[in-house]
Image (cartoon, grey):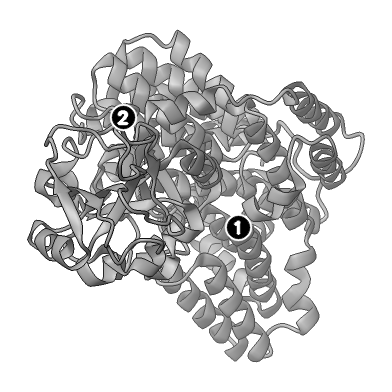
């Protein structure tokens, strides 16, 4: 073993450790690994940046835009609503139909986006049928991961192994090359979850309280967010109050009294009745006579009333907020959210989103104290209030590819989304179908077809150009581009050959099936803790080298590597798909393994039988 191999293995071990620790963003870890390879002289500058021009990266970026066209025009949402109409109220039927709808969707568009689209639909179906949404959300996430096994573009690992074949002088995999094995895995996965797996998934959320689409009152949420009835004060601004003509950002109410103004109802002095109430935001100016609804510790109300010359009115404990257009949603921070380790004050939520944070829960327990000073962590759920005009774009933008996942949405907002299908949806569907036909028939190189389709989505108005770069999954693209040189380093230094030699001399001696099983298990293990894309980038060259050493066709080993990379069933941290359902399902870490590990073993068995049949050694 040479010094260069030791250096590469050391960098690789540190990279994997950082991936697993989740202390840094995945793309930052990949860039650090890239710099380490560059500074140690393992790679030249040209080799280090080659990944950013790799066809796989460009292809994934283009496909992301195409998939976004189906989201933006409402096509994906419409499919979710169709499922809601035909699934009925039987738990088993809902589970099976949800998996059979989610899997094909994620075969052509982002699995993360598919789950984000379908999650509120699944929760609503469970609530209507009277069972816990926990019973259906993990199976839905598994279906999205399996759906990525159906087509070449279903998930990045498929493209990574196809590119590895091309780089080794072999023909690329076809668009539907994965389909026969993927369909067998889908059938096995649906049958397993329907007959056995759903009994292994616990009902963590009470079905009587799981409905997230109703308008929620502060009284109903008091037990979850410490919003006790006496923490809501209804006050009126007297004519001599120092708050008059000052906006809420300047008022200092939060810093001085821990008070958050939720709604303001203009009520000019001398007028018999108040005007229509409005949700409060940072620029809201207070005037004499205004009626304001304030979230404040009960012990501070008297001090606020006295010092700011306000009049306190009686509040009915069961009353809703002042404003009928003031809605409440719950959002949960994603693993790589920009808001992690930042406070509400630093994020400047009111100015950024025109909403108010009413409460924070961590690990299911409400946090007390000054919410503005609490540093947010992954998995925190925030209770957010705002008008439909403010919340609709927030939900629509962040729900799919943002910093948090929307865990509950009031019915009014959900219905607003249901109506938001663009008249351009036939164009988006046509572009997608033409792209698929062109890829299958090989009219042009796959990357060229995807780029043409992406440009067509933008030029046709299906994807607004202003939002393309904002919604682009830059973390995934940079992760792939920065990790591809690690594959080069493993090959250039002989590290991949060394690992492949060890596998070949042990498992390979027992035959190609044993070697395939070993590579599958190793890849599947890695995929539980680091992204499936990074796993495929690391293991593909090893599988390729191992196949050459025992003198067999590399296709079956590489296909098995791609399929194993998508079996991230046993933990909630390896893929955003699993993370998305963590909070809405109320799951614990171990819940994923209970159903996920048996399913991984079943898929290993399917691959050992089906892959050599469709991809002979």
Q: Which residue is at a point 49% across and 68% down the rendered structure image?
A: 25
Q: Position of residue 481 (x, y in %)?
A: 68, 65
**Element type where label 1 sits in the image:** helix
Q: Position of residue 166 (x, y in %)?
A: 80, 53
**Element type where label 2 sits in the image:** loop
Q: Which residue is at a point 12% across and 41% down the rendered structure image?
A: 314
Bin the neighbour count of mark 2 within 10 Å (Cα to Cα): few under 14, some 14-19, many 20 and up. some
428 left or right, relative to 367: right
489 left or right, relative to 502: right
Tag 2 residue: 215
Q: Looking at the image, is 175 positioned above or below residue 43?
A: above
Q: Which residue is at a point 81% across and 50% down the rendered structure image?
A: 170
Question: Would residue 340 be visible to someone looking at this image?
Answer: no
Q: Position of residue 68 (x, y in %)?
A: 66, 40
Quarter of the image where one finds residue 50: bottom right
Which quadrant: the C terminus? top right
Badge number at residue 358: none
What separation in Å lies between label 2 and label 1 (alpha carbons)? 36 Å
Residues at discs 2 and 1 in contact (Cβ within 8 Å):
no
In the orientation shown, which residue stands out farthest toward the left? 299
Tag 1 residue: 476
In the orientation shown, which residue stands out farthest toward the front? 270
Q: Looking at the image, is 110 positioned above or below residue 75?
A: below
Most foreground residue, 75 or 255: 255
Disc 2 or disc 1, which is closer to the eye?
A: 2
């Amino acid at each position: 073993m040479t010094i260069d191999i030791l250096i590469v293995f050391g960098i690789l071990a540190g990279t994997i450790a950082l991936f697993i620790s989740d202390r840094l963003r995945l793309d930052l870890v990949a860039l650090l690994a890239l710099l380490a390879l560059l500074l140690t002289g393992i790679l030249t500058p040209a080799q280090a940046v080659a990944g950013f021009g790799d066809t796989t990266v460009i292809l994934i970026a283009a496909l992301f835009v195409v998939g976004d066209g189906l989201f933006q025009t409402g096509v994906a949402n419409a499919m979710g609503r169709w499922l809601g109409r035909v699934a009925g109220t039987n738990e088993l039927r809902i589970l099976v139909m949800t998996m059979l709808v989610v899997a094909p969707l994620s075969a052509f568009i982002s699995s993360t986006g598919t789950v984000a689209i379908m999650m509120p639909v699944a929760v609503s179906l469970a609530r209507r049928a009277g069972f816990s949404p926990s019973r259906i959300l993990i199976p839905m996430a598994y279906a999205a991961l399996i759906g990525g096994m159906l087509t070449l573009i279903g998930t990045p690992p498929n493209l990574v192994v196809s590119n590895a074949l091309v780089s080794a002088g072999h023909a690329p995999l076809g668009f539907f090359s994965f389909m026969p094995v993927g369909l067998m895995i889908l059938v096995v996965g649906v049958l397993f979850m329907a007959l056995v797996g759903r009994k292994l998934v616990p009902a963590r959320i009470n079905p009587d309280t799981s409905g997230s689409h109703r308008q929620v009152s502060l009284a109903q949420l008091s037990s979850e967010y410490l919003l006790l009835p006496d923490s809501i004060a209804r006050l009126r601004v007297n004519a001599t109050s120092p708050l008059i003509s000052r906006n809420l950002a300047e008022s200092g109410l939060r810093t001085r009294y821990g008070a958050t103004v939720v709604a303001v109802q203009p009520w000019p002095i001398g007028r018999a009745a108040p005007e229509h109430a409005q949700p409060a935001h940072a620029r809201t100016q207070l005037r004499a006579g205004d009626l304001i609804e304030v979230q404040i510790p009960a012990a501070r109300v008297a001090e606020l009333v006295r010092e700011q010359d306000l009049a306190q009115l009686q509040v009915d404990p069961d009353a809703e907020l002042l404003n009928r257009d003031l809605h409440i949603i719950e959002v949960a921070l994603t693993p790589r959210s920009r808001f992690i380790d930042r406070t509400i004050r630093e994020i400047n939520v009111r100015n950024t989103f025109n909403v108010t944070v009413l409460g924070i829960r961590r690990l299911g327990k409400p946090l007390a104290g000054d919410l503005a000073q609490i540093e947010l962590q992954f998995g925190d759920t925030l209770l957010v209030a705002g008008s439909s005009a403010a919340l609709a774009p927030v939900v629509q933008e962040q729900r799919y590819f943002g910093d948090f996942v929307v865990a509950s949405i009031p019915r009014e907002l959900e219905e607003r989304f249901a109506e938001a299908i663009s008249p351009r949806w036939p164009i988006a569907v046509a572009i997608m179908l033409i792209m698929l036909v062109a890829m299958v028939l090989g009219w042009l190189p796959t990357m060229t077809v995807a780029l043409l389709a992406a440009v067509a989505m933008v030029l046709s108005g299906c994807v607004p150009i202003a939002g393309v770069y904002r919604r682009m999954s830059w973390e995934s693209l940079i992760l792939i581009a920065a990790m591809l040189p690690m594959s080069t380093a493993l090959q250039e230094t002989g590290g991949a050959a060394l690992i492949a030699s060890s596998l070949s001399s042990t498992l390979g001696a027992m035959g190609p099936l044993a070697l395939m099983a070993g590579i599958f298990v190793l890849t599947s293990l890695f995929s539980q803790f680091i992204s499936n894309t990074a796993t495929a980038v690391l293991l593909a060259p090893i599988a390729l080298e191992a196949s050459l050493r025992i003198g067999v066709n590399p296709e079956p080993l590489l296909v098995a590597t791609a399929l194993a990379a998508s079996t991230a069933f046993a933990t909630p941290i390896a893929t955003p798909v699993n993370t998305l359902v963590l909070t809405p399902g109320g799951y614990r870490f171990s819940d994923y393994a209970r159903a996920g590990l048996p399913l991984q073993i079943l898929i290993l068995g399917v691959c050992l039988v089906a892959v050599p049949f469709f991809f002979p050694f």
